[in-house]
């Protein structure tokens, strides 16, 4: 159904922040849990009424439990470096909402956000009030991105799903390539409580006849993706079968590695293609793997892309809140890790670069597996401060503290663990402690905590 478009009857926006504040008045399922049945009907109707801005340029669509933000950003950065004007959609943001809607190398011009915001508001005002009341923050934000992308006259889009995939608002795309990163148990209240169920939701982004580039998976998830790819006649490029990351070397400035691409992605007269000395300015073995997946996806869609653009795109890539060093005195690293696996990787990377016995400031939202994260963190820090991960989402920091100090945590020796529920006070205490004892700081457990720490040290 296409609704008549009316002239904008309310005051037009004069800044991008006004657009964001207006969209934030709609129900936000990132913040408020709601078991409403998710459907694509609303965003499809909006997109149709807007003239399908999601079709304005070829796209890459990225889903997964971990690493999807990095992979999306790396794809955008490489395309931008190749001279392809690229629009990128990601979530959540850390310090600036425009991190969600950006180009491959920075923010859009302010006028793009404003014009697209006014177009979006005019559009939604043409729908019945009952339709508007059911529309969500993420649905409108997603359409705002597509409108910005179209107004920017971009030549490609790199789009990260929000939650899941099958019913995610971004799934109105028909991409050149679908990309799925590692699958873990997440958002089980919405996606299911087994790896197979969650993989099934993520597999919803696989489009008929379009390639799927897939990160290494557990056997249970892999079976789901193989079966779905066959049913959709989608060529499957499984990373362990098509590429290999080698010679990973990381330091405090980033990660160097070699990528071997096997014959499916090179000239017919060659068996493999080896890219040596690749560098991404984020420390961590996982970032080398994310970069490998991004390269495989781009080579699948654009086999003729020049390798020099891959090198320069990765070398210039940045992403807030992903093992990001925000201070040198004392060294302060923030990472939005919020699952057992991601916290484990963040802690191991931190210890390998800065040594054990540092200060950990930790906070996570409600519903996380706190015990497993406590078991991973406690052996490596001399001081741990438990706090509130900001106020955006519900959290129970006292329960987190009780878990870190409780009897269920089986450790021979526990570090000193403090409970400072006020986030700003906790950050200040961690800084004072680190300076006094000449120790590094890791802040992790939530992107929202990472944002709070980042804002504190940038003030």
Image: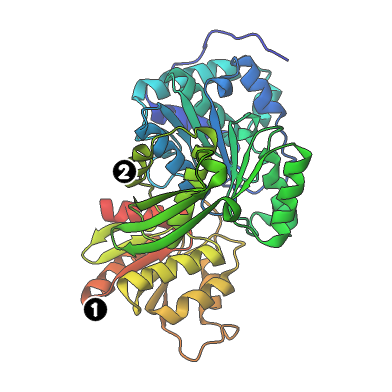
Q: Callout 1: 10 Å neighbours few (<14), some, many (20+)?
A: few
Return the residue found at the far front: 269
Quarter of the picture containing the N terminus is top right
Q: Callout 2: 10 Å neighbours few (<14), some, many (20+)?
A: some
Residue receiving disc 1? 437
Q: Position of residue 273 (x, y in %)?
A: 45, 47
In the picture provided, is 2 more to the left or to the right than 297? right
Return the residue found at the far bottom: 412
Q: Nearer the viewer, residue 245 or 128?
A: 245
Q: Mark 2 or mark 1, which is nearer the start of the sequence?
A: 2
Q: Nearer the viewer, mark 1 or mark 2?
A: 2
Residue receiving disc 2? 316
Badge 2 marks a residue whose secondary structure is loop
Q: Quadrant of residue 360?
A: bottom left
In the picture provided, is 83 more to the left or to the right than 36? left
Residues at marks 1 and 2, CA–CA distance in whole angstroms = 34 Å
Residue at image coords 53%, 20%: 56
Residue at image coords 78%, 40%: 231
Q: Position of residue 322 (x, y in %)?
A: 41, 54
Badge 1 marks a residue whose secondary structure is helix
């Amino acid at each position: 159904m296409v609704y008549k478009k009316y002239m904008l009857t309310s005051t037009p926006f004069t800044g991008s922040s006004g657009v964001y504040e207006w969209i934030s008045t709609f129900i936000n399922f990132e913040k408020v849990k709601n078991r409403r049945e998710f459907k694509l009907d609303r965003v499809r109707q909006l997109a149709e009424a807007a003239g399908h801005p999601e079709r304005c340029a070829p796209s890459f669509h990225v889903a997964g439990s971990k690493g999807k933000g990095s992979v999306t950003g790396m794809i955008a950065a490489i395309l931008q470096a190749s001279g392809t004007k690229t629009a990128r959609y990601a979530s959540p943001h850390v310090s600036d909402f425009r991190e969600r809607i950006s180009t491959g190398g920075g923010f859009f011009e302010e006028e793009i956000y404003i014009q697209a915001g006014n177009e979006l508001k005019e559009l939604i005002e043409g729908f019945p009030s009952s339709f508007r009341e059911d529309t969500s923050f993420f649905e409108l934000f997603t359409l705002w991105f597509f409108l910005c992308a179209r107004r920017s006259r971009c030549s490609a889009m790199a789009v990260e799903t929000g939650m899941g995939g099958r019913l995610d608002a971004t799934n109105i795309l028909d991409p050149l390539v679908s990309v799925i990163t590692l699958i873990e148990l997440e958002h089980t209240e919405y996606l299911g409580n087994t790896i197979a169920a969650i993989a099934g939701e993520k597999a919803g982004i696989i489009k008929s006849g379009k390639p799927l580039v897939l990160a290494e998976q557990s056997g249970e998830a892999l079976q789901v993706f193989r079966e779905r790819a066959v049913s959709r006649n989608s060529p499957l490029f499984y990373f362990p079968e098509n590429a290999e990351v080698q010679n990973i070397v990381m330091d405090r400035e980033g990660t160097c590695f070699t990528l071997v691409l096997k014959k499916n992605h090179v000239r017919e007269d060659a068996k493999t293609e080896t890219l040596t000395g690749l560098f991404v300015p984020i420390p961590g073995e996982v970032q080398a793997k994310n970069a490998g997946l991004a390269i495989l996806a781009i080579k699948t869609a654009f086999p003729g892309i020049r390798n020099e653009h891959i090198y320069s795109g990765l070398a210039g890539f940045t992403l807030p809140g992903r093992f990001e060093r925000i201070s040198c005195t004392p060294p302060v690293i923030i990472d939005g890790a919020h699952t057992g696996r991601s916290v484990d990787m963040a802690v191991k990377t931190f210890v390998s670069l800065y040594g054990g016995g540092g200060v950990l400031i930790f906070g996570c939202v409600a519903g996380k597996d706190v015990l497993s994260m406590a078991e991973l963190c406690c052996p490596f820090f001399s001081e741990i401060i438990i706090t509130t991960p900001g106020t955006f989402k519900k959290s129970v920091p006292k329960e987190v503290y009780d878990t870190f100090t409780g009897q269920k945590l089986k450790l021979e020796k526990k570090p000193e663990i403090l409970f400072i529920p006020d986030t700003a006070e906790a950050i200040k205490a961690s800084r004072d402690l680190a300076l006094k004892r000449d120790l590094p700081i890791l802040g992790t457990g939530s992107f929202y905590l990472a944002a709070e720490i980042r804002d504190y040290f940038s003030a």
